[in-house]
Image: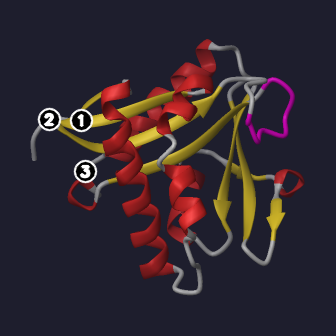
Amino acid sequence: MSVVTIREATAGDDGAVGELLVAAFVEQYARKLPEVVVTERRKQDLRRVAEKRAVAKVWVAVRGAAVVGTVALWPPGAPGSEAWVEGACDLRHLAVAASARGQGVAQALLDEAEATARQLGAPVVCLHVRRGAEGVRRLYEARGYRREARGDLDARPEVFLEAFALPLR
């Protein structure tokens, strides 16, 4: 296992990040939630990394020349934020390549995003987890995120997203 570096994503990373997000979401949902269909529209949304970087901070985990992980953080009040708490940051799109799972990449990415939220003075980090994604839920709960049903996003029949928040103060 070689060293992983966490840094802000650049335009040169957009293609790799987009494909990592599609692979991670499609692969994980297909294996763990077979009833979930990731539409072409959703794949296109995941690949719009430049649009995300325009309003959010996006980080990559890099091993050698390969992007092996990513996460994004919408600052308080940023366009497109799904945070339901005033002044909160919105965490999204955590993904780790299959070859790098279980090696602390997700933890390092979350450390960076949460530290940035603290620097921005946010009282809380908000995020959403697809209902039924128990492994993802456990990852966040182990870091101190707690369920907050008031922030749920119900877009059924396509998706139901359960809300979680990490108090920073």
Amino acid type shown at disc 1: Val
- Residue 34 falls left or right of residue 75: left
Which mark sits nearer the N-terminus, 2 or 3?
Answer: 2
What residue is shown with label 2?
Answer: 65
| 86 inside magenta stretch | yes
Tag 1: Cα neighbours inside 10 Å, few (<14), some, or many (≥20)?
some
- Disc 2 is placed on an element classified as loop
Residue at (72%, 73%) from the top-left corner? Answer: 158
CB under 8 Å between discs 2 and 1? yes
Mark 2–mark 1 distance (CA, rounded to whole Å): 6 Å
* x then y, percent, for residue 141: 60, 54
- Residue 53 falls left or right of residue 89: left
Which mark sits nearer the N-terminus, 3 or 1?
Answer: 1
Quarter occupied by the C terminus = top right
The numbered disc on residue 62 is 1
**Which residue is at the front of the view, 3 or 69?**
69
* x then y, percent, for residue 60: 35, 34
Tag 3: Cα neighbours inside 10 Å, few (<14), some, or many (≥20)?
few
Residue at (32%, 33%) from the top-left corner? Answer: 13
Q: Which residues are magenta?
A: 80-87
Mark 2–mark 3 distance (CA, rounded to whole Å): 17 Å
The numbered disc on residue 103 is 3
Residue at (53%, 55%) from the top-left corner? Answer: 44
Q: Nearer the viewer, mark 3 or mark 1?
A: 1
Residue 43's place in the image compared with 166, above or below, is below
Tag 2: Cα neighbours inside 10 Å, few (<14), some, or many (≥20)?
few
CB under 8 Å between discs 2 and 3? no
Residue 57's place in the image compared with 125, above or below, is above
Q: Is residue 35 visible?
A: yes
